[in-house]
Image: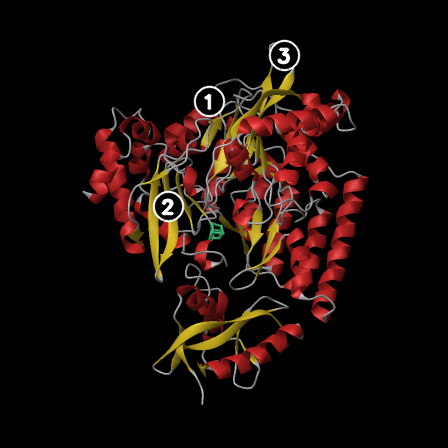
Amino acid sequence: MTTPLKNTKVITANRLIDGDAVWLGTNGQWLDRVDNALVIESKEQLEAQMVIAMKSDADNYVVEPYDIDVNVESGKVVPTKFREVIRTKGPTVRTDLGKQGDFQAHAA
Amino acid sequence: MYRYDEFDKEFVSKRVAQFREQVERRVSGELSEDNFKPLRLMNGVYLQLHAYMLRVAVPYGTLSSKQMRKLAHIAKKYDRDYGHFTTRQNIQYNWPKLSDIPDILEELAEVEMHAIQTSGNCIRNVTTDHFAGAAKDEIADPRPYAEILRQWSSIHPEFSFLPRKFKIAVTGAPNDRAAIQFHDIGLEVKKDAAGRIGFAFYVGGGQGRTPMIAKLINEFVPQEDLLSYTEAILRVYNLYGRRDNKYKARIKILVHEAGIDKIREDVAAEFARIKDSVLKLPDEDVTAIEAYFAAPEFKELPNVSTAFEQAKVRDAGFKTWVEQNVTEHAKVGYGIVTISVKKPGDAPGDASSAQMNVMADLGEKYSFDELRISHEQNVVLPHVALDDLEAVYKALVEADLATSNAGLISDMIACPGLDYCALATARSIPVAQSLATKFEDDERQRDIGPLKLKISGCINACGHHHVGHIGILGVDRKGEELYQITLGGSADEQASVGQILGPGFPSDKVDDAIETIVETYLQNRTSKDEAFIDAYRRLGAEPFKQALYG
Ligand code: SF4
């Protein structure tokens, strides 16, 4: 028996060494992009994944992990809060910077 | 300018070495985030939405060309090629890697700069008038006093863990350009009847979620007692300031709750005890510090420069820029240049490394190697000969820094907001960009006249919205960015806190709302000479409310 969450979630943090926003993936690894983050559906899964995340915190890979609400829209993970959407992309006023900028740099 | 002595040098380089070790210990796991956070904050390092942020102190906003070039170099080498000038006369870098920060601090130390006490519950960078040492209305240059306070407050063991952060501002002129009444302590340099220098002390001002105008605690404290009286205030605050609730921990709450008379009494008692201690400031010490801020070797120039007058006749753009961005200097034949870092459409206060280098070159060539950062997020060349203004202007045009909007509606203060800041509830930069673009027409904004428009991305009020003639506060209303508008704030000697007009507006309606307010002012002003804030004070909020909400 699992207890479904009101809203699906992913776990996020900032990487210790450079402060970059990262999201927890399926095998306990931290991803630079939210796209393939592990979407958590139950309370039990959240607890288990939080243990993994906190281990990375204790191992000094990330800083202060926390969970955020997300929706899956056309197969894409989209945070519900605007603040978290901005973290997945970068400043809305400098689309050359942050994740969106990395994308542009790679696409160029 | 102040130069580090051996003590300063050794202290800063030891501190860099210490922080390098702390970073290494953090990365290796010896220090947890809980252990490390207060240490990084003490060195100006925050963790924001996308990356770390490093806040570098520009003591009382004064810097040399060499220092400005170093700031440019750091932006280019370690960051994303730009920096953000803040309302505390500092600069922030938005993207440094934690592992690079010790190297950045080492580079800063090479030019006598650092990030110490730019964060944490300590006495922060002392701010002052960005026209200090150049302003015509000045009684005395406030920077020597700011420097004395900086030396006294740097790693002051008793005041390193105050209930909350503590900000001091000093003005040397009766026209307050340093917003002293919105600081924990505000100092106004004065002369008494005998011509002695001293200070009017204001205490308990601040913005944030509870904006308060500072109260006058002492009309005249002689110069020799500057440190003992300041220390007495800090002691009373350190003793009685609340530590149980961070929102009630600033001295403004203590002053508000205990009453200024009680605080005045307590401070007087403490002052009487320590007045004749080592804190007494001998004249020689003040003179020694003043020597660092001696006026540059100005030339004796005629009060009319033919070359300058001719240039204004030939170039209308130059004439407009001079009228808007050049302020009369205390010395005949010179002007104070405000370089607007507010090109409409750009993020207020953001300058690229190339722009910083241009400003550094201009400071070196035309302003006796001096630059200033203003709390309005602009850069000032304090001492430019009128004959040189045209050359300065042309170089600024080339660098995209010649916007003629100083003091006008598009010269907006804006904090980083939700685009960068972990505490933000809404974005401020895009709203500022849109408004500045809307009002960018020179003729129109000059017709509107002096108007201070300020926006913050949360109630912490780093964008000084409470003291904007028009203030905008971004809030989160059920996941939507909503913008509350206040009117009637003012940070100068006629200090006032803006009043909320009514319900907030979604981001796409803010431009129209501000337009309505401006139009209401234009229709109701007695003449062009009645500035927005004066008209508001005469009319009150009602006509603006009517126009906005019906
Ligand atoms: S006012 Fe709020 S959003 Fe703006 S910089 Fe300060 S803390 Fe951040």
Q: Label 3 sits on what residue type?
A: Gly
Q: Which mark is residue B306?
A: 1
For marks 2 and 3, give the CA distance. 43 Å
User: From what the image shows, is residue B122 above or below residue B391?
Assistant: below
For marks 1 and 2, give the CA distance. 44 Å
Point out the image quarter for the N terminus of chain B. Answer: top right
Name the residue carrying label 2.
B472
Q: Residues within 10 Å of mark 3 (few under 14, many from 20)?
A: few
Outermost residue, bottom direction? A1
User: From what the image shows, is residue A76 above or below residue B101?
Assistant: below
Name the residue carrying label 3.
B195
Point out the image quarter for the C terminus of chain B. Answer: top left
Nearest to the observer: residue B381 or residue A62: A62
Frontmost of labels 1 and 2 is: 2
| Chain identifier of the residue bearing label 1 in the image | B
For marks 3 and 1, give the CA distance. 38 Å
Q: Residue at x 37, y 46 (%)?
A: B472
